[in-house]
Image (cartoon, helix red, strand yellow):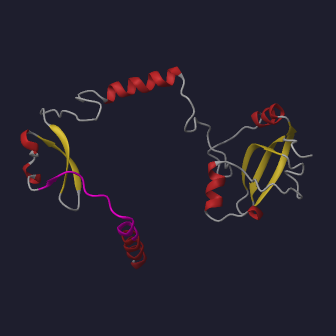
């Protein structure tokens, strides 16, 4: 039966919590959704992937085929399922446009409108904006904290509190510095 592909509408149950996920899967495993199936697939939802990333194994899930056949048959069965996405036992997430999906003309127009509103008072597309006093916002730091401050001539902050601060953002921490700060946070959290 090599080459034969079937579409299954299926239900996956995460056994420890009895949470459920419904989906459609294409496979050549005729036993998909039974105790004998070999296909390791348990679901493709975001919440299923999170469970697996946190250590869930295949034996933590049970998969049941609800309908099989061609893609249209599986899709019709899936479309009949009513999801309460906010229910604690639902592992499905609300559908949305995944990354890379082309946007409709209406969506593009809405984005354009939003950008026009956001760019009010901006002098260019790089986000350099004029402040109500006619100055510009620039990044400053004191070695520990960084802020965007209103500046006037010669990049001098309007607020004299920050006159001694350096122009520019703080350097990004290295991986070693990040790891050290996470350890410090964890050890501090364990103290109290």
Tell me the magenta residue range: 165-179
Q: Residue at x 12, y 32 (%)?
A: 134
Residue at the farthest bottom position:
191
The reply to whether residue 110 is visible in this rendering is yes
**Is residue 104 rendered to the left or right of residue 126?**
right
Quadrant where the image shows the C terminus = bottom left
Q: Position of residue 29 (x, y in %)?
A: 86, 50
**Is residue 26 rendered to the left or right of residue 154?**
right
Q: Position of residue 83 (x, y in %)?
A: 69, 40
Say if 7 sits above or below 166 in the image.
above
Say if 111 sits above or below 181 in the image.
above
Would residue 175 be counted in the magenta stretch?
A: yes
Q: Nearer the viewer, residue 89 or 63?
A: 63
Q: Nearer the viewer, residue 5 or 47?
A: 5
Residue 131 quadrant: top left
Q: Residue at x 19, y 44 (%)?
A: 138
Would residue 98 be counted in the magenta stretch?
A: no
């Amino acid at each position: 039966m090599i080459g034969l592909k079937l579409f299954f509408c299926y239900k996956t149950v995460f056994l420890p919590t009895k949470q459920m996920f419904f989906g459609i899967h294409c496979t050549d495993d005729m036993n998909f959704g039974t105790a004998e199936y070999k296909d390791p697939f348990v679901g493709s939802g975001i919440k299923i992937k999170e469970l697996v990333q946190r250590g869930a194994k295949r034996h933590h899930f049970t998969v049941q085929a609800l309908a099989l056949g061609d893609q249209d048959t599986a899709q019709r069965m899936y479309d009949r399922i009513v999801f309460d996405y906010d229910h604690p036992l639902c592992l499905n997430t609300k559908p949305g446009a995944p990354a890379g999906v082309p946007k409709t003309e209406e969506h593009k127009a809405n984005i354009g409108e939003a950008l026009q509103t956001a760019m009010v008072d901006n002098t260019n597309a790089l986000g350099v904006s004029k402040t109500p006093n006619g100055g510009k916002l620039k990044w400053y730091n004191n070695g520990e904290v960084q802020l965007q401050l209103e500046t006037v001539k010669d990049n001098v902050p309007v607020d004299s509190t920050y006159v001694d601060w350096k122009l520019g953002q703080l350097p990004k921490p290295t991986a070693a510095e990040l790891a050290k700060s996470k350890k410090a946070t964890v050890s501090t959290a364990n103290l109290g």
